[in-house]
Image (tube, rainbow, N blue to C red):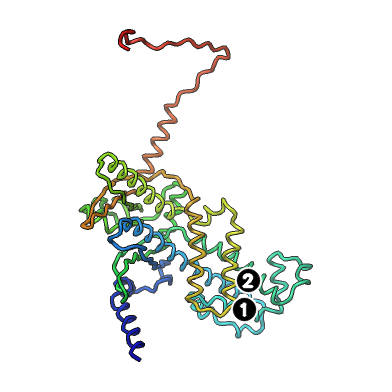
Amino acid sequence: MKKIALILLVVVSSFANNPIEEWKDNFAAKMGIEFGQTDKKGRTFYFGQSIVNVTPLDPAYVKEMALAYEKAILNMQADFILQTFGKAVVRKLYETVENDSTNVDEFPPLPEAEKMASKGKIGIIIDKALDVIENSLDQKLIEQGVSPDRLKKMTIEQKKQLFKDNLTSNMIKQAFHSMRGLVPYQVKIATIDTGIGKATAVAVIAIQSPKTIQFAKDIAKKRPTMVRGKPKRFQEILPKKKEDYLKEIGLRYTYDEEGRPMLISYGLWSVTIKTKNPTRYLKKINIAKRKARMKAESFIGDFIKTNIEAVEKLDVSSIDEEIARKITTISSTSRSSQRINDEIKETLDKYFKTVKATSNFHLQGTSEIKNWDYKDQNGLIYVGSVVTWTYNQLQNAKNYINMQKAHKKPAKRQSTNIVIDRESKVINDIEDF
C-alpha cells in the first residue's frame, strides 16, 4: 500500500510542477478556445511540445533546444494531420452511408463521429461504416478504380482492407495539403519537475486562419495580398535587450506600418567548441550565425510551402502507402487512442524530415535584419539570426532584378577567327626576385 501511495505522490508532484500544462490551460481559458477546434472566424489553434534531450549545463543544450522547438512543431503537425485525416474520413464515410444505406442510423451521427475522430478513434468509425455499406462495397471499390475481375477473387475482409487503403491514401494527401499558413503564436521553454528529476520542455501554441493561409499563397506567388491588419512599428516588435532574444525562436506573424502582413523568423544555434584561439572562435561564431540564418529562412519556407508539394518531387506513393498502412493496421486493432497518436507521430516525423530536407522556396522578400551572440551564466553561447519577409523587401528585390535586366548590354557578336596575344604589365626589375 505504501508503494502505491508513493507512486501516486510522484504523479501528483509531476502534474503540480508542470508550467507547460498550466500555460496551455490558461491560454485556452483566456482565449475561450479549444485546441484543434475551428472557431466561427475559421481560426484553429494547435499545441505541440517536445523535451530537450540534455540538461541546461550540457554544452549541446542550445542546439538541442533549437531542435526541440522543431520537434514540437512536428508533433503539432502530426496531431493536426491525425485530426484532419479523421474528420475528412468521417465526412467521406458519412456521405457514403447517407447516400447508399437503408440502415444509416447504425452509423454515428456526423457531429458525434467527428468528435470521435478528433480523439483518434478513426478505426472504430471506419469499421462501423464498412459494416453498414458491405452490400455496396463492390460498387464503391469500382468507383475507386478497382477492376470487377479483381473483386471476384477477393474476400469481404480483403475488400474492406482495400477500401481502407484507398481511403486513407487519398485523405492523407488532403490533410497534408492543408498545412500551409501554420504560424506559431507563442513559444514557452520551461523546466518540468517530473518527480524523479527535472527536464526542459519546449512548447508551441500555433494558429492557422483564413488570413494566414491566404498570405502564404500570396507569398508563394510573389503577388500583392488583400490581407490587412493593425499596423505596427517594426522596432517596437523586436526585443529591446540582447538577452531578450533568448526567449524568441521560430516564426512570428504580424503587420507592417501599412497594415500588410509580414513574417519575422528567429533562428537559433550555438557554438560548443572550447578554444583560446580568437580567430578560430570568431570563425565558429560566424558559421553558427549562418546556420541560425538558415534555420530562420527554413521556418519561413515551411510557412510558404505546403509540405506535400515538396514531397511530390520524390516517390509520393510509397510515402503515402507507408502512412496509410500504419493507420490501417492501427484501425483494425483495439489499441488505445494515445498509442495511435504516438505511432502516427513516429511516421510523420520521418515524413516531415524528408520534406524539410528536400523543400525549396524563393528567398525574394527575405532579409536578415540582425544577428547576435550571447553567453549566459553557465558559459553557454547562444547565436541567433533574425530574418524577415516583407512586401518592401520583395519590391526591392524585384526592382533590383528589373534594373539588372535594363542595364544588361547585348552580347557582341563573336568572331570565329580569334587570335589571342596578351601580356601583363611588368612592374618589377629582375633583381627584385
Residue depicted at x 60% and y 64%: 170
Callout 1: 10 Å neighbours few (<14), some, many (20+)?
many
Look at the picture and state if 45 lies above or below 408: below
Q: In which quarter of the image is residue 364?
A: top left
Residue depicted at x 45% and y 11%: 422
- Judged by depth in the image, the label closer to the viewer, 1 or 2, is 2
Query: Residue 51's x, y, as percent?
Result: 37, 66
Residue depicted at x 60% and y 77%: 332
Whether residue 258 can be seen here: no
Look at the picture and state if 291 lies above or below 52: above
Callout 1, which amino acid? Answer: Ala
Look at the picture and state if 128 lies above or below 275: below
Q: Residue 366 carries which label?
A: none
**Furthest residue toward bottom:** 1
Look at the picture and state if 124 lies above or below 358: below
Q: Quadrant of residue 255?
A: bottom left
Residue depicted at x 64% and y 78%: 130
Alpha carbon distance from label 1 to label 2 = 11 Å
Callout 2, which amino acid? Answer: Lys
Q: Tell me if 367 is positioned left or right of 85 in this view.
A: left
Whether residue 426 can be seen here: yes
Residue carrying label 2: 164
Mark 1 vs mark 2: which is more N-terminal? 1
Q: Nearer the viewer, residue 353 or 116?
A: 353
Query: Residue 136's x, y, as percent?
Result: 71, 76
Q: Quadrant of the C terminus?
A: top left
Query: Residue 14's x, y, as percent?
Result: 32, 77
Callout 2: 10 Å neighbours few (<14), some, many (20+)?
many
Residue carrying label 1: 129
Query: Residue 294's x, y, as percent?
Result: 39, 48
Of helix, strand and loop, which one carries label 1? helix
